[in-house]
Structure formats: C-alpha cells, structure tokens
Image (cartoon, grey):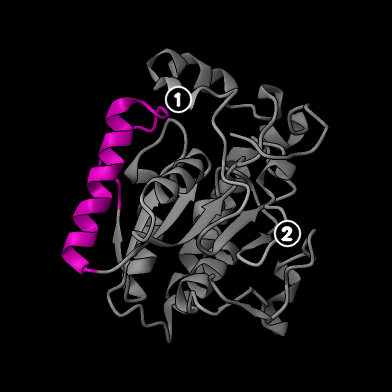
C-alpha cells in the first residue's frame, strides 16, 4: 500500500492510542452540535457520494457523515457490505457493484470518501474504474505505509490477510504515485492508530493534504474535517482549486506539510 513514507516505522505514541476513544467522543459531540451549521448554504444538487468505512467497522460508523451530506443536498451512499475486513473477493466485487449501481442511477461520476482502510480501497476503486470517480477524499488513510509497525491496526489486518486477494498483499499493493483525479487527504498529527506521515500525499497538481487536530477514530465525525469535506465536494474538479480555510476557521487547520494551501487551480490533463 505504499509509495513513500516516513522512515520512522514505529507506531503512534501509546498515550495517543489510549486517548483515542475519549477524544472521538468529544469530536462526535462537537460534530453533533455543529452539524446544522455546517450544512447551511450548501447545495449538493443530489450529486452522488460513496462513503467507505475503516477497518473492522461498517456503514454504521459513517452514518453521521452520510446524514450530514444528505442534509447538504448530496446523495450519500454506504457500501452495504458489512464489516470492512480488507480486500477479499467479496468486498472488491461488492464495491465494484455498488459503484456501478450508483453511476447507473445518477448518470455521472461518483465522489468517493474513504476512512482509514476505506480510503485505500477508494484509491484502488478509482484506479480500476477510470472516469467513474470524480474525486477522492480520505480520512486518516495510511496510503503510503511502508511497515506494519506504522499502524496499530496491522495485527487486525493480518488476521484477515489469508482471505485477501493475492494481488492485494500488503507488501505489494501500491497506491498510484500520481492521482488521475483530485485527491485530498485529511489527517491528524495526533492520530493514535497510524503514523500521520503515512497519510500525506506527495506534492502534486491533483493532490493536497489537510491537517486537523483530532483522533483517528473520530475523524469521520470531526467538525473541522466535515467542513473540509463539504468544501472539497463543492468545488469544481477542472480546474481544481486547492483548499484554503477561511480566516475565521484557520486556527482549526494547521500549516500544511507540503504547502498546498493555496488557491491556484489545477487542470486535469
């Protein structure tokens, strides 16, 4: 699942891991309190959005985000495949079928949001279905992991590895080095599950990284992440303007590691 990443192959600090649950609860409370405000003035025009869950969870975990997207005028879909145990034949074929069904209904490309492992599967989905996905947004997804030690979820992933398709072996499965569609990675340097460096896209015309202060397990219902998601869904894809938070929210979005926080729009070749 890698192209490049930090040389540090250790997992996140144990304290960050221990505090994952309480931090996620606080983030969910904040999300609930600001949900209506986040959707004010949004008009998704019924555009389709597919939301893919993280490791060992299913559509229930993405329900708050999908509810927000629906309120903002989008047509948000869960993947309807139960618990995410990685790239088994059932899951890969199932995601393909869900994408086909959504494009058949809407007659237009789908925006894909993936949380953690769901983001890696989302990038793979876009690679295998050129033209069917118009943008990718990932949440705490270790797209560039180079060692199992960089994720505290590796033991769980390895538990299901015998059922994964051979071409998706962890040591050989690669995320494309250059994205063919606009790709946004939302991450946190206080992630307690994966090293944040593994989530950062290399600088490029169609990639950007948005840092927020948050946990891994709460990023799918984090107020600042939700704002960034709605912003990224609302912008055109060609030319594609990169994320610049409004001044009154800038405190919630720390300086980006690759200096992609600018308004220059990039065109898709």
Q: Which mark is residue 214?
A: none
Q: Which mark is residue 167?
A: 1
The front one of 77 and 223 is 77
Q: What residue would you read off at disc 2? A: 203
The answer to whether residue 81 of the structure is visible from this angle is no
Q: Position of residue 117 (x, y in %)?
A: 50, 38
Q: Earlier in the sequence, mark 1 or mark 2?
A: 1
Q: Assign the C terminus to one quadrant of the image.
A: bottom right
Which picture quadrant has residue 227? bottom right
The answer to whether residue 43 of the structure is visible from this angle is yes
**31 magenta-colored:** no
Vertically, is 162 above or below 252?
Answer: above
Q: CA distance from mark 1 to mark 2?
A: 27 Å
Please, what secondary structure does the residue beneath circle 1 have?
Answer: helix
The front one of 67 and 28 is 67
Residue drawn at (27%, 35%), measured in percent from left and top? 93
Q: Is residue 241 left or right of residue 94?
A: right
Q: How many marks?
A: 2
Q: Position of residue 12 (x, y in %)?
A: 74, 33
The front one of 166 and 164 is 166
> Dot 1, crowdedness within 10 Å: few (<14), some or many (≥20)?
few
Q: Assign the N terminus to one quadrant of the image.
A: top right
Region rendered in magenta: 78-107
């Amino acid at each position: 699942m890698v192209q490049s990443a930090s040389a540090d192959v250790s997992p996140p600090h144990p304290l960050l891991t221990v505090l994952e649950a309480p931090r996620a609860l606080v983030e969910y409370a904040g999300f609930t309190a600001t949900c209506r405000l986040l959707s004010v003035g949004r008009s998704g025009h019924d555009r389709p959005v597919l939301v893919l869950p993280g490791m060992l969870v299913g559509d229930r975990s993405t329900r708050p985000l999908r509810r927000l997207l629906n309120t903002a005028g989008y047509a948000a879909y869960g993947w309807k495949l139960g618990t995410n145990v990685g790239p088994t034949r059932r899951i890969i074929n199932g995601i393909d079928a869900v994408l086909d069904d959504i494009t058949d209904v809407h007659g237009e490309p789908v925006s894909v949001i993936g949380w953690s492992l769901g983001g890696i599967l989302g990038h793979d989905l876009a690679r295998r279905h050129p033209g069917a996905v118009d943008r990718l947004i990932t949440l705490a997804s270790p797209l560039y992991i180079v060692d199992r030690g960089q994720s505290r979820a590796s033991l769980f992933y390895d538990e299901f590895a015998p059922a994964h398709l051979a071409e998706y072996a962890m040591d050989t499965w690669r995320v494309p080095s250059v994205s063919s569609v606009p790709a946004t990675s939302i991450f946190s340097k206080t992630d307690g599950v994966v090293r944040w460096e593994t989530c950062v896209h290399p600088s490029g015309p169609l990639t950007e990284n948005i840092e927020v202060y948050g946990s891994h397990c709460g990023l799918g219902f984090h107020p600042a992440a939700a704002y960034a998601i709605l912003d990224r869904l609302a912008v055109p894809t060609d030319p594609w303007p990169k994320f610049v938070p409004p001044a009154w929210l800038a405190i919630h979005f720390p300086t980006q590691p690759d200096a992609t926080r600018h308004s220059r729009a990039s065109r898709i070749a």
